[in-house]
Image (tube, rainbow, N blue to C red):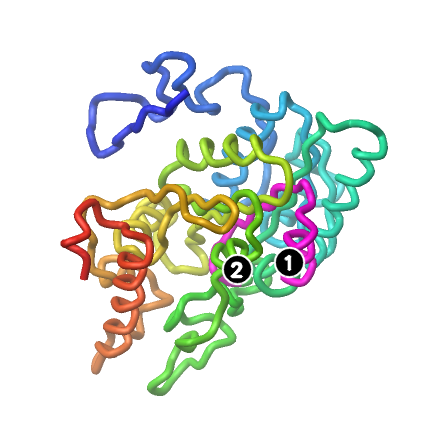
Amino acid sequence: MEMQQIKFYQTGTFTVGNRLLDEQQRSVQANMQRTNSLNSGHRACQGCGEALGARYAIDAAMRAANNQVIACNATGCLEVFSTPYPETSWQIPWIHSLFGNAAAVATGVMAAMKVKGRSDVRVIAQGGDGGTTDIGFGCLSGMFERNDDVLYICYDNEAYMNTGVQRSSATPPAARTNTTMPVGKSTGARFGQGKNLPLIAMAHEIPYVATATVAELRDLEAKVRRSMEFRGARYIHVLVPCPLGWGHGSAETIKMARLAMETALFPVFEAEHGEVKNVSKIRRQLPVEDYLRPQTRFAHLFKPPGHAELVAQIQALADRNVRRFGLLHDLEDAP
């Protein structure tokens, strides 16, 4: 069934849970029978995008798999704030792996379920950008190459936030962390470094790749459900702003995720077997400055004498995304 597009900028129409829609159109979180896979009582920071994204993603997976899900979690923020020993906020079968081998552990769980004849049990691996793009990259690529029947979800907050905001290969150019150059002409993360994991996953030509943000939670739910329709390796990359590491207000997490989309710095799309199949277009591309200014990790770009040339380079990256993915409704409006 085709999902109805809900425009949240139209006020006074639907509640966040969409309980005014037909039952088939409602979000998983609007259903009283949701599993609450990541339950309350965890110790995430106020405004944590990762906690929000994980709750929606895993509940959607549980719905799609008739509650037959095993999750493997890499070390990182999500693992640390949800399972301070001997407590846990998880209400599903859940395994803590090392920082860099969540994909390998999930592959082992999948193989065990196959031997037991439990094809109904679906396996999910999840980690942050550090455990995905850096430390766990080799295991993840191996999972892709073998086309193991695992859904890997990366919750990308663009740095190693749990250990004190260190740069990862998902940290955007010019963003300051505690391990980037603090002064000089090239402050912040350098241009020309880093990895684009969604494109790397597409290069493996696995069955399904998608990007999503916590600004569009129904879209995230829909993509998780769609991924569960495939067998083989699948990858979903979710942008989850971090108020602590990004330096924005805890009430602005959704706003920052939406600005990342509307400036075209974070393209949202779906791909199957290496080919883009669907793109979430934006009505009007906003200047990247609207996204950068509210974040203290980019504050150095705007302090006198400023770094207009770096802002221009970031704008060029956004404009390239518009052209690469056809993000604007009218392509003639693309830069």
The answer to which image quadrant residue 135 occupies is bottom right
x and y percent of residue 160 in the render?
A: 55, 62
Under mark 1, the amino acid is Ser
Q: Which residues are magenta?
A: 137-159
- Point 60% across, 46% down: residue: 152
The answer to which of 111 and 99 lies nearer the viewer is: 111
Which SS class for mark 2?
A: helix
Local packing at callout 1 (Cα closer than 10 Å; few below 14, some 14-19, many 20+) is some
| Residue under label 2 | 200
Q: Look at the numbered discs 2 and 1 and tell me whether their residues touch, using CB distance below 8 Å.
A: yes
The answer to which image quadrant residue 302 occupies is bottom left
Position above or below: 178 against 267: below
Instruction: Say if residue 48 shows up in the picture.
Output: no
x and y percent of residue 173 in the render?
A: 39, 71
Quadrant of the rendering where the C terminus is positioned: bottom left
- Point 41% across, 71% down: residue: 176
Query: Is 153 colored magenta in this rendering?
Result: yes
Which SS class for mark 1?
A: helix
Under mark 2, the amino acid is Ile
Instruction: Say if residue 190 shows up in the picture.
Output: yes
- Point 39% across, 19% down: residue: 25
| Residue under label 1 | 141
Horizontal side of residue 166 vs 142, given as left or right:
left
